[in-house]
Amino acid sequence: MRKSVNGNLSDEQLVLFYLQGDQMSLGILYERHFNHVYYKCLSFTKDSSEAYDFVQEIFLKTFAKLHLFKGNAEFSTWLYRITQNFCIEHYRKKYRNQYEVLSSAAYSLQDEEYTPGKFDNISIESIIKSVSETDQLMLKLKYLEGKSIKELQEQFNMGASAVKMRLQRAKQKISKQMKFSSEIM
């Protein structure tokens, strides 16, 4: 076992030293990857203190499971995947059962103020659910959160053209469903 760890060692070597009992290697891994993990979390949360909390949880999780790191990929790739999965899971839990509270103005609408619209009997949500969950998430991240193609590419582990194609096909499918729904009205 080494008494002191050299900062020039690879991540994989630092993991090996930690597994052999060198606690200092965790600090070096943390310092090396903190910014990358923090900014990835910040891109999801848009809140610096929440992103910082995420980072702490992610590193705790990562260090607790360090013995599972097989070295088939680079450590940074493995950590990035853990970060990605953590943020996506948090996003899913946070927005799974969100309901909007109707304002008092919505309760005070008079019947004569309402003008029937084309899509009254159609649930926009049911139309959006006609695409896969992954495509729904991609659309939300791209158009509601303003994620770039590059960020989606990294998040879903796909090439740029694959991300663009999936977004295009999902939009076309939703558009087709809306057109079909308006024709049957």
Image (cartoon, rainbow, N blue to C red):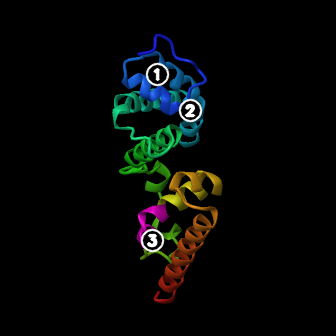
Looking at the rendering, the stretch of residues picked out in magenta corresponds to 123-136
Residue that label 3 marks: 131
Amino acid type, mark 1: Leu
Amino acid type, mark 3: Val
The single residue placed furthest to the front in the displayed view is: 1
At mark 2, the secondary structure is helix
The single residue placed furthest to the top in the displayed view is: 3
Q: Which mark is residue 26?
A: 1
Q: Neighbour class for label 2 at 10 Å: few (<14), some, many (≥20)?
A: many
Q: Neighbour class for label 1 at 10 Å: few (<14), some, many (≥20)?
A: many
Marks 2 and 3 in Cβ contact (< 8 Å): no
Q: Considering the whole magenta stretch, tell me its main secondary structure.
A: helix
Give the quarter of the image for residue 153: bottom right
Amino acid type, mark 2: Tyr
Residue that label 2 marks: 38
- Mark 2 vs mark 3, foreground winner is 2
**In the image, residue 41 above or below residue 179:** above
- In this orientation, which residue lies closer to the viewer: 141 or 108? 141
Marks 1 and 3 in Cβ contact (< 8 Å): no
Q: Which of marks 2 and 3 is nearer the N terminus?
A: 2
- In this orientation, which residue lies closer to the viewer: 61 or 2? 2
Image coordinates of residue 160 in percent, x first then y, are: 63, 62
Q: Neighbour class for label 3 at 10 Å: few (<14), some, many (≥20)?
A: some
- Mark 2 vs mark 1, foreground winner is 1
